[in-house]
Amino acid sequence: MALNNRRIDRTSEMETFLAVACAGSLSGAARTLGLTPSAVSRVVSRIEERLGIRLLVRTTRSLRLTREGEDYALAARRILADLQQTESAIADRASPKGQLRVSMAHAHGRLIIVPLLQEFLARYPGIQLEVQISDELADVQGGHVDVAIRFGSLPDSALTARYLGSTGRVVVASPSYLQRHGEPQHPFDLTQHNCLDFSFRRIEPGWPFRLEGKDQLLPVNGNLRANNGETLVQLALQGLGITRIGCFHVGPELACGQLVALLEDFNPCDREEIHALFVGGANMPARVRVFIDFLLEQLQPDARAGQSSSNR
């Protein structure tokens, strides 16, 4: 207990001495600290007695620091600043605060991430969340957003990537479409169907299927394309054609029979990985860290002890 008291007293002594150094007088420091000049003088004397050296030169009209006094004031300022920074960092970890900007893709954001945000904000009421929903990759490195949740292969960068999971794909159509046009029994049958595809620029156009033990990319054609999955699902629900879409898009629709899974015997079981991208490192804000941890907890429980890697 005595040791703890001594440490507390030394912190108080440093604050008192810095007040004297800043005010240039005992009376000025006393006013700043809400003490009497004699109490401030006793603190300075106690420091000098312990160190065995004079820190202040006092006359009736002036007060100045000795060389040792300047060194002590400089060290005290650094120590107190470090202490304040450490306490602030610990408090921030315990109760993160500030604005957190998160970018996510349209469908995955609306269907998977947004429903989780109520619980996140309830846990961390000091965080103000800004959600940006776009299929364009936001500029994390440039500071436009703090976290970007994205699909597919990752380009080389200095960003840190945390694996959140993956999603497969499924070929679907509505019962009304199949009633009018019949159900394809083989991928080659798709040449006779209206296939609703993405309008993204692709290296190799077509849909992959596993044929005779090998994955093959088969061309598909149709009279409608779209740049996002939600639109393709809506078009399929309207009975306008067959589409191949991420499984997370159509879970409820498949469960209730609004859409039907097709050609599952030929599904190549290709997976698209999902990552959270952010600027990592020792200076990563606590609000970013707790959001990443929350996503891992909710989306990929087994990944909580998993890897964090620089995306190089």
Image (cartoon, rainbow, N blue to C red):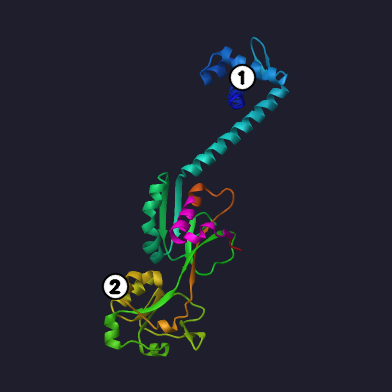
Q: Quadrant of the C terminus?
A: bottom right
Q: Which residues are magenta?
A: 290-309
- Check disc 2 and give the amino acid type: Cys
Residue 307 on the magenta segment: yes
Q: Which numbered mark, 1 or 2, is in the foreground of this view?
A: 2
Q: Is residue 190 visible?
A: yes
Task: Name which quarter of the figure residue 104 lies in.
Answer: bottom left
Q: Secondary structure at mark 2?
A: helix
Q: Would you name the residue on which mark 1 appears?
A: 24
Residue 18, position as x, y percentages in the image? 61, 24
User: Residue 135, percent across and down?
Assistant: 43, 66
Quadrant that contains the N terminus? top right
Q: Residue at x 41, y 47 (%)?
A: 123
Vertical comparison of 4 with 129: above or below: above
Q: Quadrant of residue 161?
A: bottom right
- Label annotation for residue 246: none
In this picture, is 113 found above or below 53? below
Q: Main secondary structure of the magenta part?
A: helix
Measure the C-alpha gap from mark 1 to mark 2. Answer: 79 Å
Between 297 and 47, the one lying in front of the other is 297
Identify the residue under disc 2.
Answer: 256
Residue 289 in the image: state x and y as whole percent.
51, 51
Q: Residues within 10 Å of mark 1 (few under 14, many from 20)?
A: some
